[in-house]
Image: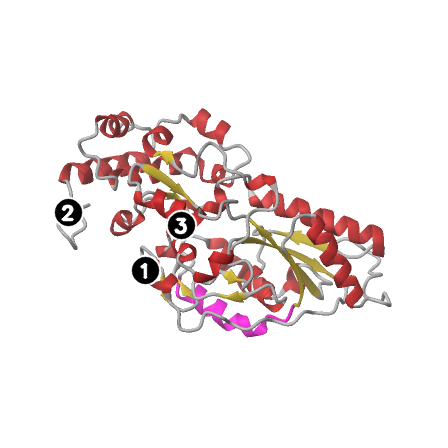
């Protein structure tokens, strides 16, 4: 945290007008919302501990290493007394984006990429704009201590954003705002400024459980409880090794992340289009042919995915994911699909080879009877 003199803690005049000024600057920087949260997350510690003890974080060992520090902002950044929380919308700009997303999911020959990952890496976009907000505040108010985050450190973004009044935690565990749904990124600024905190908002999910019912792998095991080990986002992004065979068929054509729980959420009819150009679709990834993407060399993948959040999974996992999608395509009589898979059957990576072999076996088996999953 900057401000080594610690002048912010004793600064007089820190009031609601400061928050209003921050909110105005946030809008100018493209953020759709800004709120201030107190940092007492003690009520969230038990849930975090039980989630870790259940092993639902899977291979995300860093979650366990950080432990309760995630729920104790002042331990992560000494001097922190408030969290300034912002939301940055990323939904596509057309009104029928949900219908088009469903259309891609229903096209077995097309790749489905989570809508948040179609453009530039959100980590960089949100942090850069949040840094500009901090710079503007320091220029106006004087030096103060702060540190900016966006899904980049042990920070309970959703819990803090809910405390800041940016929305409520939906049953799928994502934050929902009545005016913009759940299609926005959350940014965090820990600060030593004793800003007035905003009030949380009420939960408006009611009895709706569409998100739970829509999850292809049953990862949402109960309202507000997610077993990440079954989540398609975890399987296609975080998991480094082989995808468990029983979960490959339910993945369908999703090659990077999953939006099913958001696509069925009634509140996302209010989703707001991205206010910044960074999230415009790149490389046609909103509806790209699986075979075309599978043929990308490592060099092509790294060149095309430069600046994208997808780059972090690397070419090996990219091929692994697409092999699964090709195996689920039902295109066992399509020479282009079979040739593409066979061309990777001797790939140096045993992970790629395993998933290619599985895909070829699945395609050779043909369509399964109702209720039976070949694999």
On screen, residue 286 above or below 33: above
Tell me the distance, in whole angstroms, between the alpha carbons under discs 3 and 1: 13 Å
Q: Are marks 2 and 1 in contact (CB under 8 Å)?
A: no
Judging by the rendered image, the residue that carries numbered circle 1 is 218
Q: Which numbered dot is residue 10?
A: none
Judging by the rendered image, the residue that carries numbered circle 3 is 258
Judging by the rendered image, the residue that carries numbered circle 2 is 368
Q: Which of pointers 3 and 1 lies earlier in the amino acid sequence?
A: 1
Going by the image, does 57 lie left or right of 108? right
- Relative image position of residue 258 (x, y in whole percent): 40, 50
The quarter of the rendered structure image containing the N terminus is bottom right
Instruction: Identify the image quadrant of residue 341.
Output: top left
Q: Residue furthest front?
A: 95
The chief SS type of the magenta part is helix
Residue 231 inside the magenta-drawn segment: no
- Relative image position of residue 322 (x, y in whole percent): 34, 37
Residue 51 inside the magenta-drawn segment: yes
Please tell me which residue is depicted at 55% across the width and 39% down the height of the picture: 120
Q: Which of pointers 2 and 1 lies earlier in the amino acid sequence?
A: 1
- 58 vs 374, nearest the viewer: 374
Q: Residues within 10 Å of mark 2 (few under 14, many from 20)?
A: few
Q: Residues within 10 Å of mark 1 (few under 14, many from 20)?
A: some
Going by the image, does 103 lie left or right of 63? left
Colour mode of the rendering: secondary structure
Which of pointers 2 and 1 indicates the residue nearer the eye?
A: 2
Q: What span is colored magenta in the figure?
A: 39-55
Instruction: Identify the image quadrant of residue 325.
Output: top left
On screen, residue 17 above or below 298: below
Q: Which of pointers 2 and 3 lies earlier in the amino acid sequence?
A: 3
- Relative image position of residue 348 (x, y in whole percent): 33, 29
Q: Label 2's element?
A: loop
Q: Residues within 10 Å of mark 3 (few under 14, many from 20)?
A: many
């Amino acid at each position: 945290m900057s401000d080594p003199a610690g002048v912010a803690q004793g600064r007089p005049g820190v009031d609601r007008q400061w928050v209003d000024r921050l909110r105005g600057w946030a809008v100018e920087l493209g953020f759709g919302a800004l709120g201030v949260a107190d940092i007492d997350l003690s009520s969230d510690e038990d849930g975090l501990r039980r989630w870790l003890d259940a092993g639902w974080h899977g291979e995300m060992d860093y979650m366990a290493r950080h432990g309760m520090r995630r729920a104790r902002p002042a331990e992560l950044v000494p001097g922190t007394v408030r969290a300034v929380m912002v939301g940055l919308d990323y939904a596509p700009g057309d009104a029928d984006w949900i219908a088009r997303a469903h259309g891609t999911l229903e096209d077995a020959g097309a790749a489905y990429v989570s809508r948040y990952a179609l453009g530039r890496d959100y980590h960089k976009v949100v942090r850069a704009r949040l840094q500009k907000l901090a710079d503007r505040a320091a220029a106006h108010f004087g030096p103060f201590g702060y540190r900016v985050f966006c899904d980049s450190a042990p920070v309970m973004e959703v819990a803090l954003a809910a405390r800041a009044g940016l929305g409520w935690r939906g049953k799928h565990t994502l934050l929902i705002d009545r005016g913009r749904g759940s299609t926005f990124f959350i940014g965090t600024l820990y600060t030593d400024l004793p800003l007035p905190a905003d009030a949380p908002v009420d939960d408006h999910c009611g009895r709706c459980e569409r998100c739970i019912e829509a999850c292809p792998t049953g990862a949402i095991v109960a309202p507000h409880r997610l077993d990440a080990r079954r989540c398609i986002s975890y399987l296609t992004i975080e998991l480094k090794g082989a995808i468990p065979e029983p979960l490959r068929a339910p993945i369908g054509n999703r090659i990077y992340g999953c939006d099913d729980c958001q696509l069925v959420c009634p509140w996302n009819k209010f989703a707001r289009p991205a206010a910044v150009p960074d999230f415009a679709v790149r490389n046609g990834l909103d509806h790209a042919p699986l075979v075309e993407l599978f043929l990308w060399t490592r060099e092509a993948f790294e060149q095309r995915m430069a600046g994208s959040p997808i780059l972090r999974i690397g070419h090996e996992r990219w091929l692994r994911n697409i092999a699964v999608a090709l195996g689920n395509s039902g295109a066992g009589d399509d020479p282009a699909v079979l040739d593409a898979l066979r061309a990777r059957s001797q790939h140096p990576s045993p992970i790629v080879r395993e998933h290619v072999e599985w895909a070829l076996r699945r395609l050779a088996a043909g369509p399964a009877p109702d209720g039976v999953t070949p694999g």
